[in-house]
Amino acid sequence: MNKYYLVAIVVFAILFNWSGMPLRSADGSAKPGPLVKIDKELDKRTVIKKSLIPGSGNGLFAVVKIKKGEVIGHLGGRLLEEFPQGNHYVGALIECAQKEAHPYKYLDSKDQGANVSRINFAPSKINGIDTNFQNAGIKRLCKPPYFEFVALRTPGFSLITLMFVCPA
């Protein structure tokens, strides 16, 4: 099994805190921090448009050929000390990144997330049959930009979908 695939499944559970109790400040709001600097040149290789996945909204499409192992883009956004309830564009920094970014623990990519913040989640299997939709994996880094999306294969089509399933 591809090591990126195994890592991504574990990362998914940690990265996207769908069911955990969020941390909040006394007034109930999250405290925004600085923006994470990213390589904006990478965004020129992709475009956000209507997804081909039924019922999914927008997706990320390559406008140039992106080969296996290449960086698709960096996840930008604003660092946060606390997890904002109801925001599905927040990633948790890994422990070494939290030390680097202290006191910040999360990255909110909703408004300044770069193109990769719109990668869709597609199932790896439907009714036990491989979909082969998964073209990208996430690498969490100890230093900025903290999140990097990498091509897991050279896709035969331009839709970029993340390699693990979004929980229902």
Image (cartoon, rainbow, N blue to C red):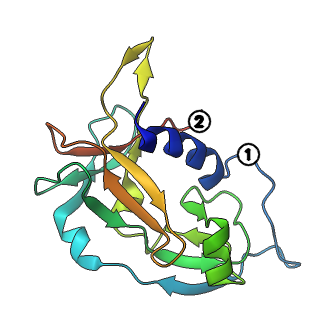
Closer to the chain start, of discs 1 and 2, is: 1
- On residue 167, the disc is 2
Which residue sits at x=22%, y=76%? 41
Which quadrant of the rendered structure holds the N terminus? top left
Tag 1 residue: 19
Residue at far bottom of view: 34
Percent x, y of residue 144: 48, 79
Q: Would you place residue 165 above or below residue 25 in this image?
A: above
Percent x, y of residue 54: 34, 31
- Asked if the residue under mark 2 is in contact with the one under mark 1, i.e. CB atoms within 8 Å, the reply is yes
* Residue at disc 1, secondary structure: loop
Label 2: how many Cα within 10 Å (few below 14, some 14–19, many 20+): few
* Residue at disc 2, secondary structure: loop
Residue 150, quarter of picture = bottom left
Mark 1 residue type: Ser
Could you say which is closer to the camera, residue 1 or residue 37?
1
Which residue sits at x=43%, y=44%? 4
Percent x, y of residue 162: 39, 44
Mark 2 residue type: Pro
Residue 92, quarter of picture = bottom right
Q: In the displayed structure, does residue 86 sit left or right of residue 75?
A: right
Q: In the displayed structure, does residue 166 sit left or right of residue 123?
A: right
Q: Would you place residue 104 above or below residue 72 in this image?
A: below
Which residue sits at x=54%, y=40%? 9
Work out how far the residue at label 1 is from the one at label 2, CA to CA, in angstroms: 10 Å
Which residue sits at x=37%, y=58%? 149
